[in-house]
Image (tube, rainbow, N blue to C red):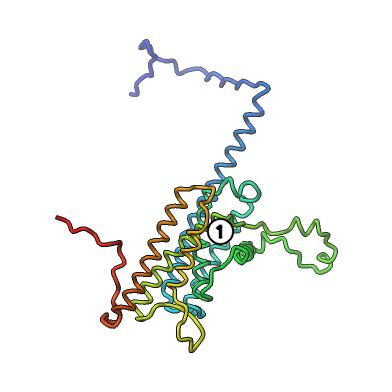
């Protein structure tokens, strides 16, 4: 037998009878304004969650592209077919993700959700690393912009694509209509590019270490028959020097100084690798991997 619900005086509560109608919310001249604010905040949080989820996936795919590029052993040459195919597959997945969030980050929203778009730094790092291995040059922001636009364009599915297939309709279209049907773009900020290139130095250091250990020579490119081809050590010297000359950005000073310090360490590690190979290279067996940890550590007592 079930018990009775009682009030604070211990008396049994009555179960019979209809429930009292819910109290009507108070309405005044400010109600509509607060309802609009509530809806706007709900849309903001939903949009932010979608951007964060896509950003996490883009970051993971960009890292996989970098892992594939680290299997390359030579600079200034075309990538092996299997690695190029893997990179194309990852870029196709990234293109679909970028196309889903591109309409969400137009105008002021590009900066409103900048903290949620850290994936673009990782994507810049992957694209610059790929460009460096192919050409032994640093890609510029002007060269990256059309690549990003092309990724977004390829990520739009046919059902979402607004391109006109009728030639007559295309000829009759006005510039205003064509402008309305333009594909949304994902723009890169100055911080996205610079922080991505900062991280590139770490990948260059890892590439130099692995390729030198496996091939016995310092990675570099140049024309055939060149007695002194340009090596990755010289490239990192120049890259590190350029960052030292740049003024501290107006954004997060702590993040800038932290990345600059990591870049200095990467340059020093590659320098130490080059010195060891030049001075004592003949004494090391092929496949030997140098110790590129920090300076001499004090012995534990």
Q: Quadrant of residue 218?
A: bottom left
Q: Percent from the top left, x then y, of residue 156? A: 63, 62
Residue name at image x 40 percent, y 58 percent: 262
Horizontal side of 182 relative to 18 (left or right) equals: right
Q: To which residue does mark 1 refer?
A: 97
Against 253, residue 220 (above or below) is below
Horizontal side of 78 relative to 272 (left or right) equals: right
Against 210, residue 124 (above or below) is above
Horizontal side of 298 relative to 209 (left or right) equals: left
Residue 44 in view here: yes
Q: How many marks?
A: 1
Which image quadrant: the C terminus?
A: bottom left
Residue name at image x 54 percent, y 50 percent: 51
Q: Percent from the top left, x then y, of residue 151? A: 60, 64
Find numbered disc 1 in the image and state the secondary structure of the residue it sits on: helix
Which image quadrant: the N terminus?
A: top left
Residue 122 in view here: no
Q: Quadrant of residue 4?
A: top left
């Amino acid at each position: 037998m079930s018990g009775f619900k009682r009030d604070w005086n211990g008396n049994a509560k009555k179960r019979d009878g209809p429930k009292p109608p819910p109290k009507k919310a108070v309405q005044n001249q400010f109600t509509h304004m607060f309802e609009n604010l509530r809806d706007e905040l709900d849309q903001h949080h939903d949009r932010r969650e979608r951007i964060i989820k896509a950003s996490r996936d883009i970051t993971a795919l960009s890292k996989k592209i970098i892992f594939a590029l680290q299997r390359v052993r030579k600079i200034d040459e075309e990538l092996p077919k299997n690695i190029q195919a893997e990179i194309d597959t990852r870029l196709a997945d990234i293109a679909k993700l970028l196309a889903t969030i591109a309409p969400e980050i137009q105008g002021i929203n590009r900066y409103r959700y900048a903290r949620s778009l850290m994936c673009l730094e990782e994507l810049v790092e992957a694209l610059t690393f790929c460009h460096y291995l192919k050409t032994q040059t640093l890609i510029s922001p002007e060269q990256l912009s059309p690549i990003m636009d092309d990724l977004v364009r390829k990520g739009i599915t046919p059902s979402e694509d607004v391109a006109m297939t009728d030639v007559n309709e295309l000829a009759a279209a006005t510039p205003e209509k064509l402008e309305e049907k333009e594909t949304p773009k994902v723009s890169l900020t100055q911080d996205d590019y610079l922080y991505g290139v900062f991280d590139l130095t770490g990948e260059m250091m890892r590439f130099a270490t692995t390729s030198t250990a496996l091939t016995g020579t310092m990675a570099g490119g140049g024309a055939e028959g060149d007695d002194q081809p340009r090596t990755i050590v010289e490239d990192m010297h120049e890259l590190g020097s350029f960052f030292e000359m740049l003024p501290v950005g107006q954004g997060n000073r702590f993040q800038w100084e932290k990345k600059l310090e990591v870049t200095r360490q990467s340059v020093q590690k590659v320098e130490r690798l080059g010195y060891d190979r030049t001075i004592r290279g003949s004494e090391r067996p092929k496949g030997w991997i140098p110790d590129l940890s920090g300076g001499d550590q004090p012995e534990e007592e």
